[in-house]
Amino acid sequence: LPWARRFNDWGKTATVLGTKESIGAAVVPPVKQTKMDVILKLQGLLGVEPKIIECPNIMSISLGNPGQVIHPGVTYGRWHKWDGKPLAKKPLFYQGVDNETADVLTGISDDITKICQALKKLDPNYDLSQVKTIMEWYMASYSTSIADASNLKAAMNTNSAYEGLCHPMKEEQGGYMPDFNFRYLSEDVPTGLCFTRGVGELLGVKTPSIDKVLLWAQEKLKKEFIGKDGKMNGANVVETRAPQAFGVTSKDALCKFLKIKKEAACCGFC
């Protein structure tokens, strides 16, 4: 999304907390229009910022989706050791990130980097240059809003665009309880992490950080995305964007879907 924002009056007004400096877009233009025609039209709707950066393919958008890293990762970091008791006040989401949580985010980001490297091995010409690490994404999106960019934790803690934003909570038992059905898990897990985990599985890439967060999150959502055998074949995988939900269940099928040229790509292994 172009902005960090929160609604005031649902469907009517919202407060923009911060505007991203740039945002990626992958475009399939309509007949008789170019990609640039569409991007310029989108830029006109947004104004000067954020600047739209053309991404070469849809995979760049899906693998480069920062929401799949940040939202489930921070939620896991804050709550995976929670004792189940209500809190007296809502904890800060971004500004409450600690070293352990930052390590979780970096781990997910590293898993995604390994997936990109595996795709590049299949086809060196397949362009994933717009898939950034989570730290690179923060600096590309919020460099002017970050007071301390020395590391990921500091960057998240000092990003003024996120000032005061809290974990999604429900008032229960005389205090505040985490709302695990909020979009940070209910949307970013099935549409983000499940997609990336599914691609990694087809490429034979181990994703330990993604697995750790995804297994915890599916329990909180009362879903099964990763099955008992550790594969993306759980009972609820059809509710996700994982390739397996759409019948893409092999490396060969993934190559075909991505239009990777087999003679240039897979060296006989695809």
Image: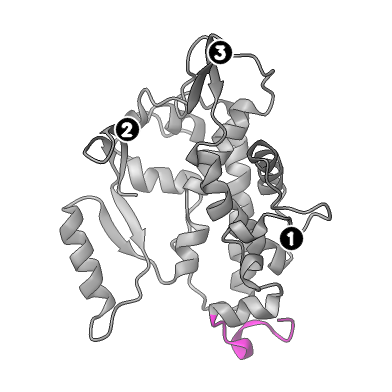
Three-letter amino acid code at disc 3? Answer: Leu
Q: Position of residue 100 (x, y in %)?
A: 63, 29
What's the residue at 57%, 79% (across, down)? 257
Q: Residue furthest bottom?
A: 263
- Which secondary structure type mostly characterizes the magenta part of the structure? loop
* Magenta region includes residue 177: no
Three-letter amino acid code at disc 2? Answer: Ala
Q: Position of residue 122 (x, y in %)?
A: 63, 77
Q: CA distance from mark 2 to mark 3?
A: 25 Å
* Magenta region includes residue 260: yes
Element under label 1? Answer: loop
Which is nearer the N-term, disc 2 or disc 3? 3
**Circle 3 sits on which residue?**
87
Q: Position of residue 16 (x, y in %)?
A: 25, 36
Q: Could you classify mark 3 by the number of other residues whose Cα lies within 10 Å: few (under 14), some (14-19), or many (20 or more)?
A: some
Rendered position, 256 above or below 91:
below
Foreground residue among 107 and 234: 234
The image's colour scheme reads: one colour
Report the side of 28 relative to 67 (left or right).
left
**Circle 2 sits on which residue?**
161
Task: Tell me the magenta residue range.
Answer: 259-270
Q: Position of residue 47 (x, y in %)?
A: 16, 53
Query: Which quadrant of the view contains residue 82?
Result: top right
Q: Give me the disc on residue 233.
A: 1
What's the residue at 61%, 36% (across, down)? 103
